[in-house]
Amino acid sequence: MAEGDAQAAGGSAGLSRRGLIGLALSSGVVGLAAGGAAGVAGGAAVARAEQGRGHEEPYAFFGPHQAGITTPVQDHLHFASFDMMPRTSREDLISLLQDWSYAASRMTQGLEVSATGAVGGDAQTPPDDTGEAMDLAVNGLTITFGFGPGLFENEDGDRYGLAGQRPAGLQRLPAFLGDDLDPESSQGDLCIQACADDPQVAVHAIRNLSRIAFGRARLRWSQLGFGRTSRTTSAQATPRNLFGYKDGTANILSDDTEALDDHVWVGASDEPDWLRGGSYLVARKIAMLIETWDRVRLVEQNEIIGRDKGAGAPLSGGDEFTEPDFHSTAFDENSHVRLAHSSMNDGIRILRRGYNYVDGNSALGRLDAGLFFLSYQRDPAQFVTLQRHLSTDLMNEYIRHIGSGIWAVPPGAEASSYVGAPLFR
Amino acid sequence: MAEGDAQAAGGSAGLSRRGLIGLALSSGVVGLAAGGAAGVAGGAAVARAEQGRGHEEPYAFFGPHQAGITTPVQDHLHFASFDMMPRTSREDLISLLQDWSYAASRMTQGLEVSATGAVGGDAQTPPDDTGEAMDLAVNGLTITFGFGPGLFENEDGDRYGLAGQRPAGLQRLPAFLGDDLDPESSQGDLCIQACADDPQVAVHAIRNLSRIAFGRARLRWSQLGFGRTSRTTSAQATPRNLFGYKDGTANILSDDTEALDDHVWVGASDEPDWLRGGSYLVARKIAMLIETWDRVRLVEQNEIIGRDKGAGAPLSGGDEFTEPDFHSTAFDENSHVRLAHSSMNDGIRILRRGYNYVDGNSALGRLDAGLFFLSYQRDPAQFVTLQRHLSTDLMNEYIRHIGSGIWAVPPGAEASSYVGAPLFR
């Protein structure tokens, strides 16, 4: 991970003139750029004391792909969707992406949001960094940015001059059977996925990026999650969702480069070229009717899922990682695993990265809880095909899709640049 | 902690006849008691695989005090407030407390909610345990129960025959200057504080206890929290709240038995006798206007808090643990530390155990975030006096108290009994 540090230092220095100036202007701070650039380029400390228990080596921010996709899934999520403010220009959007990239390149390396940090600046100005992560380790923080359909065409027409660059697949998802979407928890011009092994580190990142966006973009909705419901490396055990079942057994793993190239990364022959090395992100907030589920007999729960609750083995037998035998009569034809499995969907696969959520409870005393589903795919059609196939899923009686969003996820930033730069060339 | 295991096994066995029968009846499960008692008494496995990273030794459930008060503060909170259902009887309340105690005595030892667990029972019945914590370590889970004013007198009069046992101090808190309380996030007949180093373990506990309460009590409101904002042992570093400041520097620590006896535990000479060894819990949901706070100059932030943001030292000098010198002119007379410090309040102290929270964001794009304040004290008057003293706190411009509750927290259950048993003798 020394490479990551070096990349971050070099990259931030490269970016710093534009990034820092943008930050200085937007926050009304003067005289920050020089010291800031020196601080980052020199890799000077401000590093947080190692107090946390999570992943302590930083993940590289710069590189061919954004971090936070194949990165081993961290324990906690803070996801945020933003809308651009009215009357913002192409230059506002570019400066926002530069400032966000600069701040993200620092925070993901365990540094404060700028070189003056939470307490090191001029006491007569508000601190650049809000400070609540000051003593915490980096906790494997990754920050992943996405671009929604609204950037490419919106009610004001082609405000950002990007209509010609719009990926054909970047369309609002079609309506699915049983959708009960809340517009206020759906869509957004931009999204940020912050993942870390300590929620305070992820919250700190979203809070500070939201603050940096002031006057240019506004937080539209946000979601906290815990208990990762998938795995992206074979070293991670498969976690359980709030139905009590292992989730993510058949996920695409980070060392399966062939599957990643086939199913996750936008490829060298795909259009548009600025998105090559990127991906598409689909988010679905799926409420679980857990009190109803909890009254279902175990044998029936297993039938609905198509797997054994304890070990996670398919009902056709074996252990968690045995391939299901769908010729077996053990499965109901509408069991979840049967409808969702790649072998029943022309080999379609997606990389899942969702989290459990609990948002308190309803007035009726039911927990407001479920799965915040996140998936990365080379083409949104993969998700659409799978989701349509789930229209007869026995599980549908116990879930409601209440939020939805789609974003194009650009490739990682080059060390001298910012996330999304190829889009503006 | 072997002691804790022994206590749990012995205690559960002692409680099991009543506890299990209650559970079996309430969930419609028959033939569960014998196997369940044997399973627990024999300490038979069902123990979760040690996959989590948190505190792996269980804390004792039975003992003179409930766990979760002086226990080293865990990383995550799920707090829940319940109301008794209409037309419930004294017997319903007793059976609920027995069933809750039985389940808590198991879950806090890393066992499933009953001996048949999430998958081990009759497949033709719903599993006793919802299963999502099946593979997780105990993660230091503690479950702490409290009794609200409504148990002792309610709109139906003295439904539970407890009016004569009501602690004089157990009254709804008075209105404080600046209160903006939401009744739907306040009060409650019963409360449960579940703390663990993995949120999924705390959520699992509240979910299953809520399920066990079916027909007797109903979830009224609940709150998730992270980033403990205090410490209860000197081995714990002082964490930061969402204003970026260290919080809990002067907290009462678990090894300070004199301070605990003076300020936290209801004493041998206090009334009522059933509460001796217990405490009073005050909860306050305090929204922080963080976007406003983040625009305040550092020097002014320090003035408001009365401490230095970086090290946490009082403005009169020294380090974090230096006693503030309030004769110094360094402090504004309405700085938070000056108004809250015990030396300025006739020596009054409380044991704080609060958590940061983020509940998403408002329609204006502001994070809905703050501090879920929890304090334990021998007498609620301690909190009332301190809170009244804070009426001129400079910090008040940046916070709103939006939720409130008070509960009497009974002593720990004896190994052959349940939490609250002395109240019904």
Image (cartoon, coloured by chain):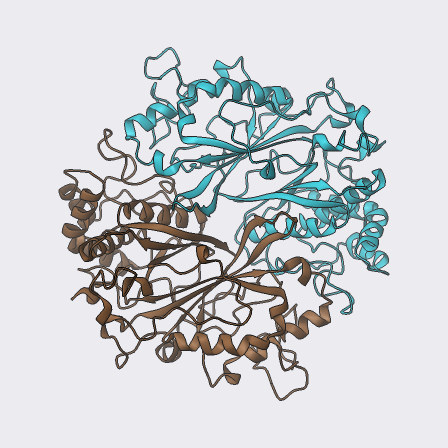
Chain colours: A brown, B cyan
* Residue A163 x, y percent position in the rendering: 24, 68
Rendering coords of residue A57 (x, y %) = 35, 55
Q: Is residue A384 above or below residue A95?
A: below
Where the N terminus of chain B falls, by quadrant? Answer: top right
In this rendering, the answer to whether B270 lies above or below B228 is: above
Residue B285: give x, y in percent of width and height: 53, 35
Q: Residue at x 65, y 38 (%)?
A: B67
Q: Nearer the viewer, residue B134 or B137?
A: B134
Closer-to-camera residue (B48/A417) = A417
The image shows residue A223, relative to residue B94, as above or below, that is: below
Which residue is painted at 80% across and 35% down in the image?
B421
Residue depicted at 72% across the width and 72% down the height: A299
Asked whether A390 or A309 is in front, the reply is A390
- Is residue A286 shown left or right of residue A319? left
Q: Can residue B410 be seen in this view?
A: no
Tell me where residue B222 sits by quadrant. top right
Left or right of B285 on screen, residue B393: left
Q: Quadrant of the C terminus of chain B?
A: top right
Q: Which of the pair B303/B50 is nearer the observer?
A: B303
Residue B159 picture location, percent across and down? 82, 34
Looking at the image, residue A416 sits to the left or right of residue A136; the answer is left
